Image (tube, helix red, strand yellow):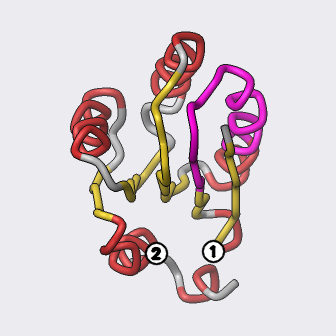
């Protein structure tokens, strides 16, 4: 599994690149970063890019559910970029677990996802 994290807009946007199969230990890398940004900003936006993504192990699925419940109100917008119909289904599945506005984008729409996730951010923050 590969998880890459990149902060944008002064930490108000977190880009997460996922490939392979997400395991419980991937959350040990990912969750502290999200917690740190939420502590700093109150709410953040996330852009999740899935490339050659094969889902979650059982342990990771449990960690994901705990993450969703803990951060129910802290994710303002969630853009998901993927390549498969089931990934679009995950965006729909996530909606009851968050107050975030969620949009799914096909890989060919990555530029629109970037524009949407950064829309309406204060100009000083958007220029990093």
Question: Dot 2, how many residues are within 10 Å of its Cα: few (below 14), some (14-19), or many (20+)?
Answer: many
Residue 49 forms part of the magenta stretch: no
Residue shown at 47%/46% (left/top)? 75
- Where residue 55 appears, x then y in whole percent? 46, 31
Tell me, yes or no, whether the two marked residues, 2 and 1, touch with CB atoms within 8 Å: yes
- Residue at 65%, 46% (x, y): give it: 38
Image: 128 above or below 109: below
Query: Does label 2 or label 1 sit earlier along the sequence?
Result: 1
User: Which quadrant does the N terminus fall into?
Assistant: top right
Q: Which residues are magenta?
A: 16-35
Q: Is residue 92 left or right of residue 114?
A: left
Q: Residue 111: x percent and y percent?
A: 39, 80
Query: On the image, which quarter does residue 41 sit in?
Result: bottom right
Q: Quadrant of the C terminus?
A: bottom right
Q: What is the chief secondary structure element of the magenta stretch?
A: helix
Crowd band around label 1 with a 10 angstrom C-alpha radius: few (<14), some (14–19), many (20+): some
Q: How many numbered discs sit on the rendered protein?
A: 2
Measuring from the top left, give residue 118's x and y in whole percent.
46, 75
Q: Is residue 119 left or right of residue 53?
A: left
- The residue where tag 1 is placed is 9
Apparent side of residue 12 relative to residue 25 in the rendered image (left or right)? left
Above-or-below relation of 31 to 41: above
Percent position (x, y) of residue 15?
59, 60
* Residue at mark 2: 118
Secondary structure of residue under mark 2: helix
Q: Residue at x 57, y 47 (%)?
A: 18
Q: Quarter of the image holding residue 125? A: bottom right
Residue at disc 1, secondary structure: helix
């Amino acid at each position: 599994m590969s998880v890459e994290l990149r902060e944008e807009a002064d930490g108000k946007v977190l880009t997460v690149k996922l490939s392979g199969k997400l395991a419980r230990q991937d959350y040990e890398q990912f969750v502290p970063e999200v917690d740190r940004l939420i502590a700093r900003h109150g709410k953040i936006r996330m852009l999740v890019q899935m490339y050659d993504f094969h889902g979650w192990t059982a342990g990771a699925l449990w960690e994901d559910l705990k993450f969703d419940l803990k951060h129910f109100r802290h994710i303002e917008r969630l853009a998901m970029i993927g390549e498969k119909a089931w990934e679009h289904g995950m965006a729909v599945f996530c909606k009851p677990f968050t107050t975030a506005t969620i949009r799914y984008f096909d890989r060919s729409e990555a530029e629109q996802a970037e524009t949407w996730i950064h829309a309406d951010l204060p100009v000083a923050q958007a220029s990093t």
